[in-house]
Amino acid sequence: PSTHSTSTLSLLMNQVLNATVQRTADHAAPEITLDPLEIVGGEIPSSENTYFCQAARQLACVPSSQLCVKLASGGDPTYAFNIRFTGEEVHGTSGSFRHFLWQVCKELQSSALSLLLPCPSVAANRNKGKYILTPCPISYAEEQLLHFFGQLLGIAIRADVPLPLDLLGSFWKGLVGEPLDPEQDLQEADLLTYNYVKKIESVSEEDDLEALCAEISSQHHSGESPDSPSRPCCTFTYITMTGEEVELCQGGHNLSVSWENKDVYARALRGLRLQELQNVECMTAVRAGLGSIIPLQLLTMLSPLEVELRTCGLPYINLEFLKTHTMYQVGLMETDQHIEFFWTALEMFTQEELCKFIKFACNQERIPFTCPCKDGGPDTAHVPPYPMKIAPSDGAAGSPDSRYIRVETCMFMVKLPQYSSLDVMLEKLRYAVHYREDPLSG
């Protein structure tokens, strides 16, 4: 869709979201208390201790209508719930809330939780870092967690906090209810199986089929054909994405792949993978959770890519956009030398460093790249966490070059000493983003 229709669509979506608010300003936000000490040495010992599961447990008895708040706007946005960290006295809730969403995305894309599965195509060096919903029968407890995952997607949309989640395109198709493409989606998700299916379909000699079966049985397990023991054979079984061997039809273990039935076998393989990708049972739970926060009818207006952009934003930082959404405080100006050093330094950063800088300054790794002020709204209406504020550093004693950059994450404020050169600015910025793991300052 053209940008014009997209911005009209997003305005319409915003109107619908604000018209379906169920918790207004005169109601207190639900509050959850997280125990940050349960993450030991960078590793989360058990899934119960993740922020995701701590939050799911505490919010289980909160009516989901309480989480349906208006779109975040202004300097003190209303979020779905407030977060306290045990033993921390943090003033301002937005930094903690954004840090929570960031941490939860890290947990979901780690071995601490099993709701998402690394994309199998990674074995063929494709879609590295992408995830799909884990395809397997789910227990009641897992269904609750998937429901909560869906709620978090809706909460992030209302909060306008793009989630650093990297989910394969087939996930977003399933979410909006669009059918999968049996070619393209299989190729993206599992390139090895896709190539194997293609080879079986295109084999033109019986001997080639035998060679192909020999190759695959040596990879999986050496089976021998019952009718002639010396011949390796494939049976109507295959390994699921989660690593279990399953029969592709009843009695598949005892049915050998032959020249006559090879096309049925190829279809069955493709069918198994597409069924795993559609993952109807898990997707239904996610959609139910999402539907408790935003009206699912909204999704029918959007393409899978538009829903992904609305939920996860873009995994890169647009410096020009950031620049136009920056305010200078207390007598600072964009033309001040140290401010020019600041922007030049950021222009020298890699995208990874820029994401770390944003995380350092406002506790969110991805930030929105559209803002009502661009769409003809008043200049004061910015989508949080914008605008970024640059302020002088605290205290006046000593040389500026000996000071460090400080931030107030709730306000997206960077307190910048007047460094004497670009080199010093680069060094201090790199130090700040690489070594400061203190998400609770402000």
Image: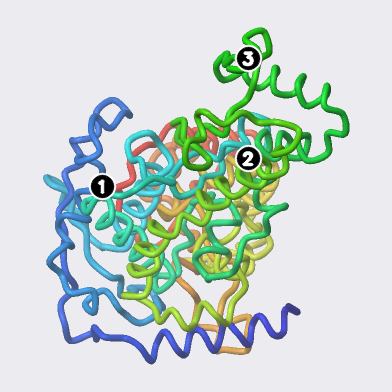
Q: Which of marks 2 and 3 precedes in the sequence?
A: 2
Q: Tell me the residue at 72%/84% (across/down).
A: 4
Taking 333 as reference, is 438 left or right? left
Q: Is residue 353 above or below residue 172?
A: above
Residue 82 appears at what percent x and percent y? 22, 64
Nearer to us: label 3 or label 2: 3
Q: Is residue 74 visible?
A: no
The one of 381 and 218 positioned closer to us in this rendering: 218
Residue type beneath disc 1: Tyr
Q: What count of labels does the image hold?
A: 3
For label 2, the crowd category at 10 Å Cα-Cα, with few meaning under 14, some 14 to 19 and many 20 or more, is: many
Q: Which of marks 2 and 1 precedes in the sequence?
A: 1
Residue placed furthest toward the top: 230
Q: Is residue 172 above or below residue 382?
A: above
Q: Which residue position is annotated with label 3?
A: 218
Nearer to us: label 1 or label 3: 3
Residue type beneath disc 2: Asp
Mark 1 touching mark 3, by CB under 8 A?
A: no
Q: Give the SS element for disc 3.
A: helix
C-alpha separation, residue under disc 3 versus residue under disc 2: 20 Å
Q: Give the SS element for disc 2.
A: loop
Nearer to us: label 1 or label 2: 2
Q: Which residue position is annotated with label 1?
A: 51
* Quarter occupied by the C terminus: bottom left
Taking 310 as reference, is 411 left or right? left
Q: Tell me the residue at 57%/64% (across/down).
A: 173
Taking 304 as reference, is 40 left or right? left
Residue 395 appears at what percent x and percent y? 36, 48
Residue type beneath disc 3: Ser
Residue 312 appears at what percent x and percent y? 52, 60
Q: Which residue position is annotated with label 2?
A: 190
